[in-house]
Image (spheres, rainbow, N blue to C red):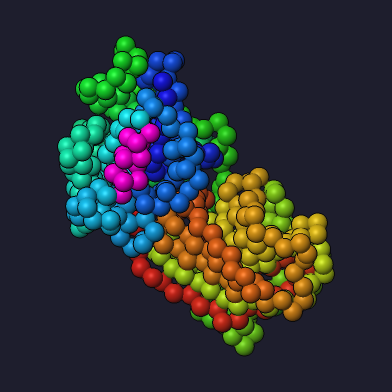
Amino acid sequence: MKIYVVGDSTLAKFNDLYFYPRYGYATMLNQFFKDDVTIINNALSGRSSRSYILDPEYKKTFDELNKGDYLLIGFGHNDEKDDDFLRFSDASLPIDNKLSFKYSIYNNYVLPAINKGAIPIISTPVVRLSKNNNYTGNIIHDTPHGNYRDALIELGKEKNITVIDLTNPTKELYEKIGYDKAIYHHAMTSGIKKDGKVVADPTSVDKTHLNYYGAKYSAYLFSLGLKNTNLELKKYLKNELEAPTDADLFMDSKYEFIEYHKPDLSKYNPGDNFKTTTKGIYGTAIGTFENPMDLYAYEDNNKFIVGTKTLNGRTVATSDSDCFIFKEVDANLNFKMSANAKIISFLNTRQSAFGLKLRDDIYINYNYKRVSASNYVSAGFITADASTNIIYSRASTTELNKEPNFINEFYKTGDTAYLEIERLGQRITVKVIFRGKEYNKYFFDFDLTKIDNKSMYIGLYASKGVLVEFSDVNFIITGEAKGA
């Protein structure tokens, strides 16, 4: 027996290095089924029922789905994002309206599954965590654009499709145990030192995503719901369904405590090569450098000169060394930054990089010895042995992820580029225009609050043999960011 899973982050697989890492509840379902059930989890973080169809996992799922298989469909959290045209669907509209949540779920998932001879199961979204234990409104997916849980229940009745409700059961559980206990069902990005011991930092809690314990509990609630249906699949559940206990709550063994102190920018102490005049804009150098005297991140007549004239600094799999002009942004805001870049000089070397970067943390006053390998996305360029990659990111201390956009040569002195990063809730859009060609990338649910959970830092960077002039720099706040 096979169960295919499509859905958002509350069902998906993760590879976090958190204190309590994120786990989607579909990763725990196998613990409640007998061994002859195979679960293929194709859920993806940050997706809605509308945006998921653009991912290769959508086609892969329906290419592999066969008669007699089951398809678990779990969307809702991101369909609610009415500020995001790519993901939003309206729960208040009827099924015959193409903009409706019902239309998207039925036509993109239910009907294709039925046409393949598979059996669809719809799951309503788990609730978000409420600090004041008030489970109303968006926390339970009851929005100005309709109630997403109720829309799925109605769809099930209209089309005779099995719907398993996880919204009400998770709401009732959290109301019963209260916030002080419910918080430990959720992921926490970091720990704090207390009495010489590293313990969970409750201020770093993720109010949407579950941890191992929380995911297992939601999988347990799903199994209870399945048990009360008429589906043949319930015969494959284990005979005894036992509720998880807090013994399933444990710190991840791979978690590395980083004692980060958010810098006080009022104590910013620029050297001669890092002076800026625009309020709220700062120059710094992050990473390890052999010759700190040859670093530039300063403002000159409304332009910014960033980089180095020698082979100083580098970008590799395990670390970055950047000269960086940056602005601090509240992590609760949406924003957009753009700039034009012109290469003043370049020494034709590998491991050189420049562009526009949005990163998790910041360091000032130039340690020059601090190894930097923080999470970031870059609308920028990085050179390899004889080529240049365009757009890349770092998702952990050892993962430098280059997009498959490249030219078979180095960039050159005199080259120009347009760079843009836009943050809209969970979606970060990166754009680069270079030599007449446009490159784009969407990053969904990219973690930029692992170390500093209050702010993000966006700015202009360059290192190792490249000096860049950035002009027409524009930054705007576009509103408040909606949570996951």
Q: Going by the image, does 23 lie left or right of 276? A: left
Q: Does the magenta stretch include residue 441?
A: no
- Of residues 199 and 319, the one nearer the viewer is 319
| Position of 198 relative to 339 (above/below) | above
Q: Residue at x 48, y 48 (%)?
A: 55
Of 331 and 93, nearer the camera is 93
- Compared to residue 105, the image places residue 168 above or below, namely above
Label tally: 0
Question: Which residue occupies 57% across, 34% down?
Answer: 254
The residue at the point 28 percent across, 27 percent down is 221
Lateral position of residue 153 relative to residue 351, left or right: left
Image location of residue 255, percent across then percent down: 55, 37
Q: Is the magenta stretch mostly helix, strand or loop?
A: helix
Mark yes or no: residue 313 visible: no
The percent coordinates of residue 10 (x first, y second) are 38, 40
Q: Where is residue 440 in the image (x, y as percent from the top left)?
A: 55, 63
Q: Give the range drawn in magenta.
A: 104-116
In the rendered image, the quadrant that contains the N terminus is top left
- Residue 114, quarter of the rendered image: top left
- The reply, left or right, for residue 3 in relation to residue 443 is left
Q: Quadrant of residue 83?
A: bottom left
Q: Height in image: 451 above or below 280?
A: above
Residue 255 can be seen in this image: yes
Instruction: Name the residue: 57% across, 76% down.
Output: 339
Q: Position of residue 337 (x, y in %)?
A: 50, 72
Task: List the single residue furthest toward the top.
Answer: 239
Residue closest to the eye, 439 or 362: 439
Up/down of 197 relative to 272, above or below: above
